[in-house]
Amino acid sequence: MINRRLIRIKALQVLFAFFRNEGDSLSALERELFHSIEKSYHLYLLLLLLPENMVEHAQAKIELGKQKFRPSPEELNPNLRFVQNRAVAALAACKELQAKANDNRLNW
């Protein structure tokens, strides 16, 4: 999420860079500001995609545990609370999030 605080921080960083490097043009600094904000937005999207990928990894680990030759009782009956989390399922079902991740070519 891009909020005022993040924009303020990024703007001050670009201003500091402008005064440090007096040869830079204003348009180059503006491009740098927008690039920095875009990278922050990509990081935000990646953080929203992270729980879904963690659940996929946990499901794969549970399946590997069940396929062992001599699985332990914990591997036969694992705790599925993390895998069946409704909040993660809602994020995974969000079409907008998936579309934006595909548009920006973001994945873990």
Image (spheres, helix red, strand yellow):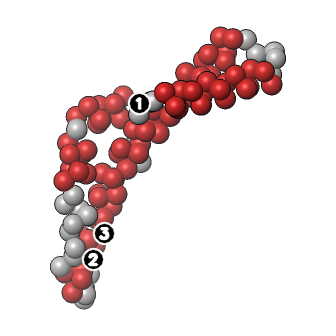
Q: CA distance from mark 3 to mark 1?
A: 29 Å
Say which label, 3 or 1, has the lower sequence index.
3
Between 91 and 68, which is closer to the camera in this rendering?
91
Residue 100: give x, y in percent of width and height. 34, 30
* Residue beneath disc 1: 104
Q: Are marks 2 and 1 in contact (CB under 8 Å)?
A: no
* Residue beneath disc 3: 61
Q: Residue at x 78, y 21 (%)?
A: 19
Q: Are marks 3 and 2 in contact (CB under 8 Å)?
A: yes
* Residue beneath disc 2: 65
Q: Are marks 3 and 1 in contact (CB under 8 Å)?
A: no
Between 27 and 77, which is closer to the camera in this rendering?
27
Q: Determine the secondary structure under disc 1.
A: loop
Residue 63: give x, y in percent of width and height. 24, 70
Q: Determine the secondary structure under disc 3.
A: helix
Depicted 26 relative to depicted 78: above or below = above
Q: Amino acid at mark 3?
A: Lys
Q: Does the rendering let one see residue 106?
A: no
Q: CA distance from mark 3 to mark 2?
A: 6 Å
Q: Determine the secondary structure under disc 2.
A: helix
Q: Does the rendering let one see residue 55?
A: yes
